[in-house]
Every structure is written in C-alpha cells, then in structure tokens.
Amino acid sequence: ASHLTMAAQQELRQRGRAAAERPAPMPRANSFESELGDTDGDVSADEASLDRSQPRPPPAAVPKAKRSMAVRAFSACCMTAVALGILALGHLAVCALVFLIQVMIFKEVTMVRYRTAKSSEVPMFRTIQWLWFAVAIFFSYGDALSNTMPTPLSRWLHRRKYRVATFAFFIDNHEVISMLCYSVVLVLTVLSFKKHYYRYQLGQLSWTMVTVWICVGQLHAVVTNVFTGLFWFVYPVSLVVVNDCMAYFCGVALGRRLINRPFLKLSPNKTWEGFIGGGVVTIIWAVLAPKLLTRWPGLICQCTDVDNIPRCNAEEVHDFSSGFPLFMPKEYPMPEVLHGLIGASHVELFPIQVHGLGFGIFASLVAPFGGYLASTIKRAYKVKDFEQTIPGHGGVMDRMDCQLLMALFTTVYLNAFVRMEVFSVNSMLFSISRLSKEDQVALYRELKSKLKGDGLLP
C-alpha cells in the first residue's frame, strides 16, 4: 500500500511540473463579447497596456485586421458614392432609397427571432409578418403623398401618357383603404393561431409590431422631410455619421485615460471620452455644416417639380416660425460676457445654424442610444450582425440604427419649430382641385372680390 502511495505522489509531482512548464493561455475578455465583435467599440488605455503585457497574436492576425479595415473603408466609399448619385437623381430617387432601406431593415430585424422549426408548423407565418409591414407602409406613404406634395405630384402624374385615376384614388382614400387592410390582416392573424403555439405566435406578433415601429413608424414622415428639401435628409444623416466616426476615433485615442469609469454596461468597449468627444465635434459640425450645404441650391429648395431637382435662390426658403429666410445671413446679439472674447456685440449666422444647435445636441446625446438598442438586440439573440449585406459593416440595420431615431427627431423639430404653418399654397390648391368646377369658379370670384376690397388688386 505504501508503495502505491509513493507512486501516486510521484505521478502527481510530474503532472504539476508539466503544468508549470506549459505556457499560460492568453486571458480573454468575456467570450460572448468577443463573439459579438463590437466593431464600434473604443479601446481603453488599461486594455491596451494589458494587451502589451501578453504574448503577441500570431502574425496572420494582423493582416486579417488590416484587410477587414480596408474592406470596411472601401464599402464606406462605395456607399457614399451611391448616396451622392441618388441625391443627384432628385427627390423621388431619395424616397425610393428610403423605401428600400425600410424593406431591408424589416427583413433583418424580423429574422433575428425567426425559428424555422416552429415557424414551419405555423400557417402563413412569414406572410402575415409582411402583410403587417405592407399595411404600415401603405398608410405611411399614402399620408405623406396626400399631405406633403399634392401639387408637384399632380403635375407629374398629368404629364404621364397613361391615366393615373386608379393611383389617385388610392392616394385620396388611403385612410379608408388602410383601415380595411388593417382589419383583413388582423382577422388573418387571429385565424392563423394554432394550438400549442399561442405563446410563440403572440411573441412573434409583438416582435413584428416593434419592428414595424422601428422601420416604418420612425420614418413615417421622412418623405415629408425630403420634399420639404433634400437638406432635411442630408443634414441629419451627416450629423449621425460625424458622431459615429468621431466617437470611435476619440475613444481609441483617449479611451479611459481621462475618465476611468465604465460608460455603458450594454457596450463595455464604449468610453466617456468617445461619447463626449464625438458629441463636441458633432455640435461644431451641426453649426458649420448648414453654411457649407447652402452652396448647393438643389438641397435647400422645396420640391416644385418631381422630375428634376428644383433650382431656386436662398431667399425663397423661409423659416415660417420667425418670418426670416432660413438660409440667409442674419445678425444675432451676443451676451455682454462674450463681447470681449469675440470682439463684437453681434455675430452673423444663418438662422438654420441656430436651429443646428438643437440638431447637434440631439445627435450627440440621444441618437447614439438607437445604436445601443440595436446592440442589445444582437446580444440578446447572440448574433454579431443583423445581416452581411454590406461587406465590413454587417446589415442595413447595423448602419441605420441611429439614423432612424434622428429621422424621427427631424420630423418633430420641423413641425414644432420650423414648418409651423398649417396651410400652404400647395395644400390649398390641392383642396381647391377637389371642388367641382362650379365651386372653383365661385371661389375665384369670392377671392377676387375680397382681394379688391382689401386693396391688394386694382
């Protein structure tokens, strides 16, 4: 027995020496974190020093990272070129791009919860999801087309060689048609419920509604923004892009060197330095960008002709909330405290630059949380990207997560502080066009008589 005990002790000592001689494995971060690959994360100074103290990765890893960065940069350049080309085609092309983005986002987000095993046994599973999306899209675009651009749309339609009475019928009655479609889809949804799958189907239905809000609800009035002027599409997009890029670079350069505290548990690689640095640069860009964008009149003019980008002078674009031209210089008084600092009591700015402060603050403080929400969805369902549509970037949702929230803010801000007039010439002409010919003539006579009485006509 003693002989066996000594032999066992000797074997244990040999195993201990072998384990001590074996090189220690490199410490890894949270395995789930590394699996997700947070491409937008910031690298902290502590992490960098820890990496330098550990063995270097194999030489093949460095070229792979460089190739990934090159692919990412090339894809970004291609997306920029395509976006500029679409802008050159005009308002309808931009609206078509927005529609395509909505379709891709809906497909990607709904697929996150898609389980083939269960869904194959549920009748009309994917069909019902897309029917809900179609109803929401029809109502959204019907509302925008009927209220935003009646005159340009009618001019464009009447120049076509074919008759568009059917299309006009759908636009004029989109609310009633949307309600009918909604009712039909609701009935089909309830009839599709299958025993033993109620919980799963209700969960998928809830997820479908959330997805519809993400890609349709937040972009409900983006068509309205586009036809108000391409500026209201380009400007918010540029703010999110600048914030995203500068937050990354500031995080890489200064991450946890100034504030050694975690920023957000949902995204551990994000840092306060990246968030603050990106925000400061975004606000600066929000003030400076409008002056640069006004050099292209096609961006700031409302759509008066669907076939072409309109050409106009900046004087024609007004801020209805103040009565001053929105894209023309105006002097603003400065607080006395700043007189000595800037050497003047007034500063000359475009009114849109003042509005830009609100856009910049929102793009810096709130819009990034749209991206954090998307990251949470991916972590919850253990996927790295929503899709692999864009090489190096993932899916469309991976690039548009913050843009959706920014588009919603743009609509609300325009309606609340810029586009405050309830009535416009276009909307009134559209309403008049729906009167009978006799009523139109009677309205003309009454209006002419009133204008003469007011001394506006001889």
Image: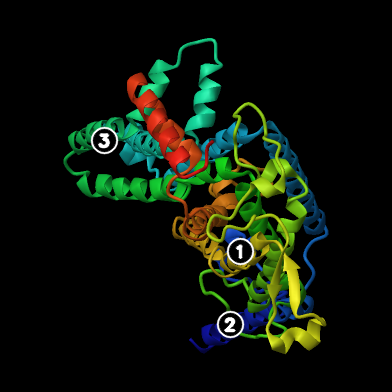
Instruction: Report whether residue 432 is seen.
Output: yes
CB of mark 1 within 8 Å of CB of mark 2?
no
Query: In the displayed structure, would residue 137 be above or below residue 329?
Result: above
Mark 2 is on which residue type? Ala
**Which residue shows up at 67% across the image and 35% down it?**
310
The earlier-in-sequence mark between 3 and 1 is 3
The earlier-in-sequence mark between 1 and 2 is 2
CB of mark 3 within 8 Å of CB of mark 1?
no
SS for callout 2: helix
Instruction: Report whether residue 170 is seen.
Output: no
Q: CA distance from mark 3 to mark 1?
A: 37 Å
* Label 3 vs label 1, nearer the camera: 1
| Label 2 Cα neighbours within 10 Å, binned few <14 / some 14-19 / many ≥20 | few
Quadrant of residue 54 within the rendered picture: bottom right
Q: Which mark is residue 7?
A: 2
Mark 3 is on which residue type? Met
Residue at the disc numbered 3: 179
Residue at the disc numbered 1: 355
Query: In the displayed structure, would residue 266 be above or below residue 406?
Result: below
SS for callout 1: helix
Nearer the observer, 341 or 209? 341
Picture quarter with the C terminus: top right
Q: Classify residue 423 as left or right of residue 262.
A: left
